[in-house]
Image (tube, rainbow, N blue to C red):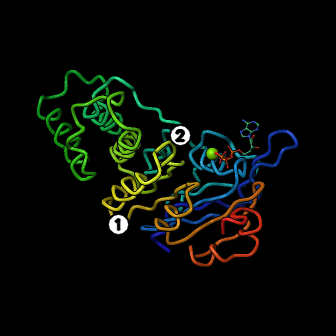
Amino acid sequence: MSDLLLETRQLRKSFGGLHVTRDINLVLRAGDKVGLIGPNGAGKTTLINLITGVLAPSAGAVHLGGEDVSALSQAQRVKRGLVRTFQITQLAPTLPVRLQVEMAIHERQGTVGGFWKPRSSYSAVQDESQAILQSLRMAGLAARAPVELAYGEQRLVEIALAMALRPRVLLLDEPMAGVPSGEGQVVLDALATLPADLAILMIEHDMDLVFNFADRMMVLAEGAVLAEGSPAEIRRHPAVRAAYLGEEG
Ligand SMILES: Nc1ncnc2c1ncn2[C@@H]1O[C@H](COP(=O)(O)OP(=O)(O)OP(=O)(O)O)[C@@H](O)[C@H]1O
Ligand SMILES: [Mg+2]
């Protein structure tokens, strides 16, 4: 189908004898909101590292918009609309948010350090930065630096930086990590403002939040797909309850 954005085919990764990713087939179409869960060490972050090109697979392939991108660099994949955020925050702590978003836009445009550019293109970048922050309801944070922000606000900045790269597929590795419980909804509210055709894969340990967010779930255990389905199906899936949710389910 034409709206198929991301596809992993029999993706596999081993570190020595440790099989961390076992033949994963994952498909994301325009507008998909997929939750990826699984116990610590299940291979969730490794899967994102394989998709984005941080790691080379031991076998299998990654396709983006119908193109095999398995041999492409991280940057080349970003140019094709594949953008991620990290489990551990990667912000410049003291640089104003507005400037960090502007830098991400320049990075996308390949205009980093382009001092010879006409002034008008700078104001276009400033306008775009402002528009991104406004759409995420973060205009009030524009002049502040991450060190001054609450952790939940910092995670929003990371999403703003990702959006500055104009993703078609957004991979979020625990976007609510470190956010006090009860404030995770702020991140979900911000995600709800993003374009409807953006495909999002979210790794998240907070079951209530990820079940709320996703219209489809994938469960990993020991590197393999344990279950796939709607949030309701996954909630009552016996193997998932046994392996992951435990008594909590
Ligand atoms: N570079 C590496 N070399 C060796 N083993 C690795 C490497 N990276 C990850 N692993 C191992 O692969 C397994 C999966 O790790 P991964 O970080 O993908 O798990 P995860 O599902 O993201 O876990 P968490 O929920 O704790 O973030 C773990 O056993 C980890 O120790
Ligand atoms: Mg992880």
Residue highlighted by disc 1: 196
Q: Give above or below for 210 relative to 102.
A: below
Residue 147 position in % (x across, y down): 36, 27
Q: Amino acid at mark 1?
A: Ala
Q: Residue at x 39, y 53 (%)?
A: 187
Q: Residue at x 76, y 71 (%)?
A: 239
Label 2 Cα neighbours within 10 Å, binned few <14 / some 14-19 / many ≥20 = some
Which quadrant of the frame does ligand 1 lie within?
top right
Q: Between residue 131 and residue 166, name the one nearer to us.
A: 131
Q: Which quarter of the picture shows residue 24?
A: bottom right
Q: Which quarter of the picture shows residue 240?
A: bottom right
With 118 as the anchor, is 12 left or right in this view?
A: right
Q: Which residue sits furthest right?
A: 17
Label 1 Cα neighbours within 10 Å, binned few <14 / some 14-19 / many ≥20 = few
With 23 as the anchor, is 201 left or right in this view?
A: left
Q: Residue 74, which numbered label?
A: 2
What distance separates the C-alpha of mark 2 from that of mark 1? 25 Å
Q: Residue 27, which numbered label?
A: none
Residue 226 position in % (x across, y down): 74, 66
